[in-house]
Image (tube, rainbow, N blue to C red):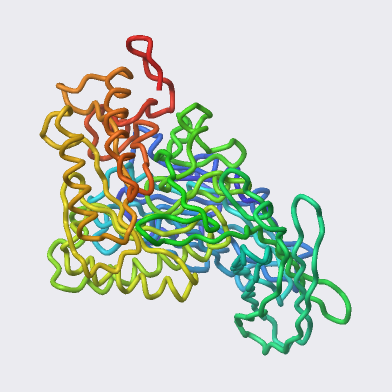
Amino acid sequence: MSLTGVWQFRLDPDRTGETKLWHKSTSGPDWSAVEVPHTWQIQRDSADYFWHRVVPPGFPGASGMEGQDLRVEFEAVYHSATVWVNGQEAGQHLRKGYTAFTLDITPYLEFGASNSMVVRVDNSFDQAMLPRGRSFDWTPDGGIYRPVSLLVSPKVFIERVDVDAVPDIAAGTAVVFRSVFLQNSGNRPWAGSIGFRIADEQTGLSSWKENRGLYAPGARARKRAGLCRLRHYATQKLWHFDHPHLYRLRVVLTERDQDFHALESTFGVRSIEIKDAGFYLNGMRVWARGCRAHGWEQPEFRMAEPPVADPRPRRSKTIELCVYARSLATGPACSRILRPPRHSDSDGSAHLGPDTFQGMGNKPAAEIMQNGLEQLREMIARDRNHPCIFSWGLCNEINGQNPPRTNLLRACSKKQKNWIPGGYVPTLRTPCKVTLQKTSPDSWILWNGTNTTKVGIKALPTIFAAMLEQIHEAFPGKPIVISEYGYCACTPERPEGDARRIEVLREHNRVFREREYVGGLIFFCYNDYRTHIGDKGVGVMRQRVHGVCGPLRNSKAIVGGAAI
C-alpha cells in the first residue's frame, strides 16, 4: 500500500522537536502540507533537522488487518531517520541516506482506530558516516526523497529471495540457486511448503519445485532452496544488454494445500568474467560505453523522486547509446530506474571523497568501517537479482596508496563474496594521478581521467596515454575503465560549447580505444548538477557544469551547429 502523497512537514532548526513532543503531535498550525517524496531544499528557509508526519487518510486505520504483520518500507531517507508510530518509537535508520529500510510497526498500531506516523530526519554533514563530512561533490538534499510503502503480510512471510543463475553456455542450460529469507513473527511454529516457479517472461513456460520446512515462532531463517536446471536454449535466452531476456521467479508459501503468501523477483541468466585484462559477458569479450547521470532535478522536486513520473534521464542520443553507467551520485539508484528491461550495466559506490580517511591511521575508524559494511549489505540486499548490475564500487578519489582505504576495501570485498557469489570489486582512482599498488584486492581498475587538472586541454590525450600505460604495467591482468572523462566548462578559460566538447571527446576516445585493456568508457557527465561546493550559482542552486545538459536536464545552447 503506497504511503506517498500528502504528509505534514516542519523544520526544526533548534532541534527541540522531540523535547516539545512533536512525535506525539497530531495537529498544529506550524505544520504545512507537502508531497512525499519530498526534500526541504526546494524551499528558501532551511535547516538540517526537520520532521514529516502522515495521518489518515494517508496512513490507514489498519481496520481489517488484525492478525497480519505490518511493516513500513522507506526506499531512502537522507540521511538519518527516526520513526514514531502513535507516539512510540518504532525504529531508526542512521547515517545511510541512499539505501532502503523496513521497520515492523505492528506492535504500535491500534487496529480499527486512527493511527499516525512521524519521521524525524537529519541531513547535517556527519563525520561518522560515508560519504564523510563534506568530502563529496553533490547536493545533500534531505528528506523522505523516495517512495514509502506499507507492507501487509501474514505472520509467516517471505522477506526477500536471492537468485543466482549460472549458465553452461556450451550445454545451453543454467543452474539456478535460490535462497529464501523467511520470517515467522507469530507465536506458534509453522510447518508448510515453499514452492518455486520459474517462468520465461516471453513464452510463459514455467517449472515448479517444492520444499517443506518447520519454523519456530519468532524465527528468521534463510532457506537455501537448492538448485534446479533451467534450459535457456543457448545464447538466445541469455541476458545481454542488446537483448535483455528475463525470467521471473515466484516463491509461494503453502499450508494445508492453501497458498497464503507469495513474492516475485525477476532475474537473468548471464555470466560475467574478468580475464586477460578484459570483460567477458556470456563468454564474449565486450567493451562497454556510457555516461554518468546525476540525480533527478525536476524543479519542483529537486533530488526527491516523484512516485509516478519516470525518473530516468530524458531520452537523447547520449542516453540511447549507453550500455554502461555508474549509479546516481552514490549508493543505489532508485528501484524504478533498474526495473526491467534495462540495457545498462550499473554499479553503486558507497565511500567517496579525498577526506574520507583524514586523521586515521592504518585502519579506518570503527564507525566508518561499520557504516560502510552496513551500506554495502543494504545495497546488495535490494538489488543483487538485477542482471544489469555486476559490481558494487567501494571507493572514489580517496588515494589508492591510503592504508585505511585498503583495509576497508579488503573487509568489504570479503563480506561481498558472502553476500553475492562471484561479485566483483573495483576501486576508483584519483583524477589524473597514477597511484600504483600491485597487491590491491581490486578486481578491476576504475580511473577518473577528468580534465580538471591545470594542464592545457590539448596536452591531456598525451598525458592520459602515458598514465594508462603505467596503470596497465602495474595491473597487467586487470581491465581499466575510464570512469570519468569529458569537458568541464568550470573555469573562465574553458567556455561552454558543444564544438569544444566534441573535440575533446573525439581526442580522448581515440586514446582510450587504441588500448584493448581499456574495458569501458563512462562519459562525465550527462547533466550539470547541484552541489554544496559548486563553481556557479548560489544557495541551493550552486552547481558543477560538466554536463551536456543543464541541471534541470534542459538542453544547452548548441555552438557552431554541432550536436553531441
Q: Position of residue 552 (x, y in %)?
A: 42, 28
Q: Position of residue 225 (x, y in %)?
A: 67, 79
Using the rendered image of the protein, determine whether residue 542 is visible from the camera's viewpoint. Answer: no
Q: How many marks?
A: 0
State which quadrant residue 199 falls in. Answer: bottom right
Determine the residue positioned at 71% across, 65% down: 263
Between 263 and 35, the residue placed more toward the observer is 263
Question: Which quarter of the figure is the N terminus placed in?
Answer: bottom right
Determine the residue positioned at 59% across, 67% down: 166
Up the image or down, 33 lies above or below 437; here it is above
Is residue 517 rendered to the left or right of residue 469? right
Is residue 331 rendered to the left or right of residue 310? left
Q: Position of residue 540 (x, y in %)?
A: 32, 34
Is residue 102 rendered to the left or right of residue 210? left
Question: Which quarter of the figure is the C terminus placed in?
Answer: top left
Q: Residue furthest right?
A: 257
Between 213 and 277, the residue placed more toward the observer is 277
Determine the residue positioned at 22% across, 59% down: 356
Between 71 and 376, the residue placed more toward the observer is 376
Determine the residue positioned at 59% across, 57% down: 116
State which quadrant residue 509 falls in. Answer: top left
Using the rendered image of the protein, determine whether residue 37 is visible from the camera's viewpoint. Answer: yes
Up the image or down, 65 lies above or below 292; here it is below
Q: Position of residue 324 (x, y in %)?
A: 45, 45
Up the image or down, 476 lies above or below 106; here it is above
Is residue 408 rendered to the left or right of residue 271? left
Q: Residue furthest front?
A: 170
